[in-house]
Image (cartoon, helix red, strand yellow):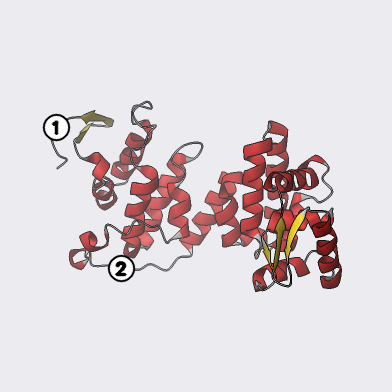
Amino acid sequence: MHCLFIISILGPVSFVDENIIKIIEKLDIGREEFFETIKKLNKLELVDYFEGKATKICDQNFGNYIVYKVLVEDKKVSLSSFIEKIYPNGIIKIISAINMIYEIFYDKDIEDYIISEIKNIWNKEPYSSDSKFLYHFYNVDRIKALKMIRNEIINEETRTIDLNKFDFNGKKNNQRIDDKRIEILSNFKYGEFNSEAIELLIEYYKKRPDLIMDFYFGFVLNLGIDEHSLNNKYKSELNIIEIFMNNGEKTLTSLYFMQDDYDGIEFVSYGGYCEMDICKRDIY
């Protein structure tokens, strides 16, 4: 079962992939034992075996069930200990497994168990101060994520940029957020602590105006008008704009309105009250 679980969660397993080999070496199974077990599983038609090159589970549905049974149903391997063993090399495999469990086997008890296991690790060093761990699991504990990002922003070196000489339009079509802090904070549009995340975006922009394109793409990809906006009466978008304006952040306010989705939308502010109307005029 142990080898079958490893192949199911890591597969396809390439024997020439150094990253995969490093992960397997951390899982308390000898190389020879692993290969012998693979051959036996192949004879039972449970895995495909490509001599000396790779192996993979024959039936992906069966493999999904094995991962669920070992990690969640029987808990023969605790999720927290497994993450510790294969982090950081195998973190993408773990995230894929968690997403699969949520999608196929979800119930509230399973979600609570997974969140509890991840929090158990996150409270330990070196994970509690690991920016990569934060990036992968920030939604598990948003308060902790915001505190970590705030501390990172405080310690960030201030940089400058001459926006008058910056070629914004030349970079506008490259829609990708390279900065992980901006990516995380811009994903707080819905749910708890949205306002706190926007406040941190403002603080970060004051330190790193040179990342202006990442901020813009954060607005375009995550914080702008989406399929939920109309039904929500643009409450999230209005909240973002109000926070920008209350902080006197003219650059970010202007940047937010440069999104194509805001063509034909009028923003009106009467004192402390904001309103967004669909209209025929462009934004000025």
Q: Quadrant of residue 108?
A: top right
Residue, disc 1: 280
Residue 124 in view in this figure:
no
Q: Residue at x 38, y 62 (%)?
A: 207
Q: Nearer the viewer, residue 119 or 98?
A: 98
The label number, if any, that marks residue 97 in the structure image: none
Amino acid carrying label 1: it is: Lys
Judge depth for marks 1 and 2 and give the one in front. Answer: 1
Residue 254 shown left or right of residue 52 in the figure: left
The answer to whether the residues at label 1 and label 2 have Cβ atoms under 8 Å apart is no
Q: Which residue is identified by label 2?
A: 160
Q: Residue at x 37, y 34 (%)?
A: 227
Compared with 94, 61 (above or below) is above
Residue 161 lies, with reference to residue 151, above or below; the image says below
Give x and y (percent) for residue 61: 69, 44
Q: Nearer the viewer, residue 81 or 27?
A: 27
Q: Alpha-carbon neighbours of circle 1 within 10 Å: few (<14), some, or many (≥20)? A: few
Q: Secondary structure at mark 1?
A: loop
Distance (Cα) linking label 1 and label 2: 37 Å
Going from N to C along the chain, the mark reached first, 1 or 2, is 2
Q: Is residue 30 left or right of residue 231?
A: right
Asked if residue 110 shows in the view, the reply is yes
- Give residue 12's quadrant in the image: bottom right
* Residue 48 in the image, given as x and y percentages of width and height: 73, 59
Tell which of 157 and 117 is nearer to you. 117
Name the residue: 34% across, 37% down: 237
What residue type is disc 2 on?
Thr
**Crowding at mark 2 (Cα within 10 Å: few <14, some 14-19, many 20+):** few
Horizontally, residue 263 falls left or right of residue 92, namely left
